[in-house]
Image (tube, rainbow, N blue to C red):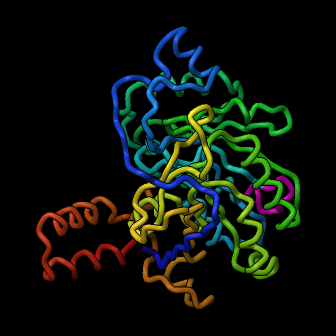
Amino acid sequence: MSGSTYAIMLKFKAYILRGLSIHTTPLSGVGEEARAHKAANTPKNSRHITSELGAVCPTIVVPGPFSASDLRFQAEQLATQKLHNSGFNCVACQVLVMPRDWNQKDSFLGSLRNVIHEAEGRALYYPGTKERMEAFRNQNPNTEVIKRSSGESVLLAHLDPANGSAKQLVEVFAPALNITELPGADAEQFLRSAIQFANEQLFGTLGANIIIHPSTIAAIGRRRFEEILQDLRYGTIAINAWTGVGFLSPAATWGAFPDHTLRDIQSGIGVVHNANLFDKPERTVVEAPFRPFPRNLLSLSLTLLPRPPWFITNRGGAILGRLLVAFNYRPSLLKIPRIFFHALRG
């Protein structure tokens, strides 16, 4: 998948997945009974329940020497994180965290606006979407409206991290995105600040994305970079990729960062997938090449795809999806060349 790889980082503090119990009785009852049980931490339903819930998922853009092509490609990446399935994903990007002092900040945001404007929209089919988007606009008087070539518009709102409003954010299951800026022209300093912001102010721990230039990783040092990532408390972290790729990888774990409780459930308890059957996983890290084919050849990174098939800008995404479904329904070696042809077109 676009040369993406994953690594599962382990520690000895986690929830063990013991199975799923489903019961129609609310955990704590209803009404006054529920409030009493929650206050006393004595759930009425004592069965062990695992769950995966949503989150206010961030994408952190680390300052670096992006070329014009890099800005465009990573803007397509970010637009996909927000607008794939029209934003109706539990791990869709909800907050874009930008470096305030980066000299390419405006260029990146300009590329993002262009990609969104050019992208084909989808209907707001999910129940309650229009009401949530209206609430988003009411909470953000200066909301920016980006019209698309077809389909519904996309909403952008700038968030001030200093006033504590980020703690009040909810998951907007819709094509609407918050943007916040943090100080720091130094890449490592900014990354640490962004991680602290995500950990302390954003609800949930399901997935976080990081866009970072390879030379920036080299300047920080690969080992030091990975040590910094250990502070980011999310169940899946994607580096120059989308956490949705982690969800699509059967061997990877999928779920919230460990140690949530019924009193503070956030993004849930337990993990699924985990084909290697690790009993105490902490998180999955997905990493993809920073540049697509053929520009990746200059940096000796491995990918054959000019544009991943899940990108909203992929020209063959619709037909490729149909071909993959047909292959899974009735596998045949004769179907593979056509799948590769459309995948390599981008």
Residue 257 x, y percent position in the rendering:
60, 52
The answer to which of 23 and 251 lies nearer the viewer is 23
Task: Say which quadrant the N terminus sits in.
Answer: bottom left
Horizontal arrangement in the rendering, residue 100 relative to residue 82 (left or right): right
Q: What percent of the width, then of the height, locates residue 62?
A: 75, 63
Question: In the picture shown, does residue 152 fall above or below 108?
Answer: above
Q: Is residue 231 left or right of residue 130?
A: right
Q: Which residues are magenta?
A: 99-107
Above or below, 41 against 204 in this view is above
Q: Which residue: 40% across, 62% down?
A: 248
Q: Position of residue 227 (x, y in %)?
A: 76, 71
Residue 177, quarter of the rendered image: top right
Quadrant of the frame with the C terminus = bottom left
Kindly identify the residue that appears in the image at 61 percent across and 31 percent down: 263
Residue at screen point 43% across, 78% down: 305
Closest to the observer: 108 or 186? 186
Looking at this view, name the residue that lies furthest to the top.
Answer: 32
Quarter of the figure with residue 150? top left
Residue at the (55%, 69%) spot, across then down: 286
- Would you identify the image quadrant in which residue 156 lies? top right
Query: Seen in the image, is 224 located left or right of residue 143?
Result: right
Residue 114 appearing in the image: no
Res. 187 in view:
yes
Position above or below: 340 against 183 = below
In magenta segment, residue 103: yes
**Magenta span contains residue 237:** no
| Count of residue discs | 0
